[in-house]
Image (cartoon, rainbow, N blue to C red):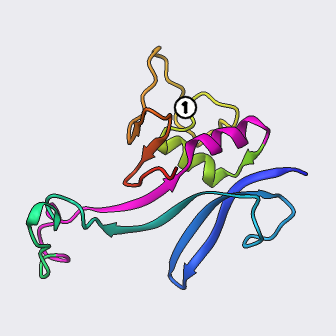
Amino acid sequence: MPVRIRLARHGHRKSPVYHIVAINSKRPREGKPLELLGKYDPIPRVRIDDPVIGGGGIPPPAANVFGSDPSLVRKEKKIEWNVERIRWWLGVGAEPTRTVVKLLERGGVLTTPHKWQHPWSPAPQTTSSTSTAGSVETAAGETTGFAGKTAS
C-alpha cells in the first residue's frame, strides 16, 4: 500500500482550508485518510493576537484594514502540523507531494539537501549550520512554521 502525504481540500467555495494527511495513494482527494497530520490555511488573514492589531488591549483599527497604511495590518497564512508524526511517516516511506514538500521546506521540517530535492527547491546550504528561517524549534522537537502553531 503506497502512502502519500498530501493535501485534502475542505472549506467553502473561494475559502479553502487544506488538511495535511497521510493517505493511500489510490484514495480520492477527500477520501478517508490514515492520519490527519496538520491543517493549512492558504488565505492571508489578519492576526487578531498581533500586538499592533488587537493584542495588548489595543482595539483593531476598523477603518484602516484596507487603508493607506499597510504597515499596521499584517496578514499571514496559517499552518498547524504535528512534526513528529510527519517525520515518522517520512521515515517509514511515505512520499510527499510537490506542494507538501514546499510547505515542509518553508516551515523548516525538511532541510536541504533532502531526498525530494527538485529544481524549484532552494539551493543546498554550503555552511555547516542549518538555518530554519520562518520556524521555531520547541523542546519536544515540534516546529512552528509561518504564523501557525504545532498541534500535539
Percent across and percent down for residue 133 are 38, 36
**Residue 78, above or below 116:** below
Task: State which quadrant residue 147 falls in.
Answer: bottom left
Q: Which amino acid lies under the numbered mark 1 shown in the image of this protein?
A: Thr
Would residue 3 be found to the left or right of residue 75 on screen? right
> 38 and 129: which one is in front?
38
Would residue 72 be found to the left or right of residue 83 on screen? left
Percent across and percent down for residue 94 are 77, 44
**Residue 51, above or below 115:** below
Percent across and percent down for residue 110 are 57, 36
Q: Residues within 10 Å of mark 1 (few under 14, many from 20)?
A: some
Secondary structure found at label 1: loop
- Residue 73 belongs to magenta span: yes
Q: Which residue is mark 1?
A: 111
Look at 80% across and 71% down and name the residue there. Answer: 28
Task: State which quadrant residue 139 falls in.
Answer: top left
Give the extent of the magenta segment. 65-93
Would residue 115 be found to the left or right of residue 129 on screen? right
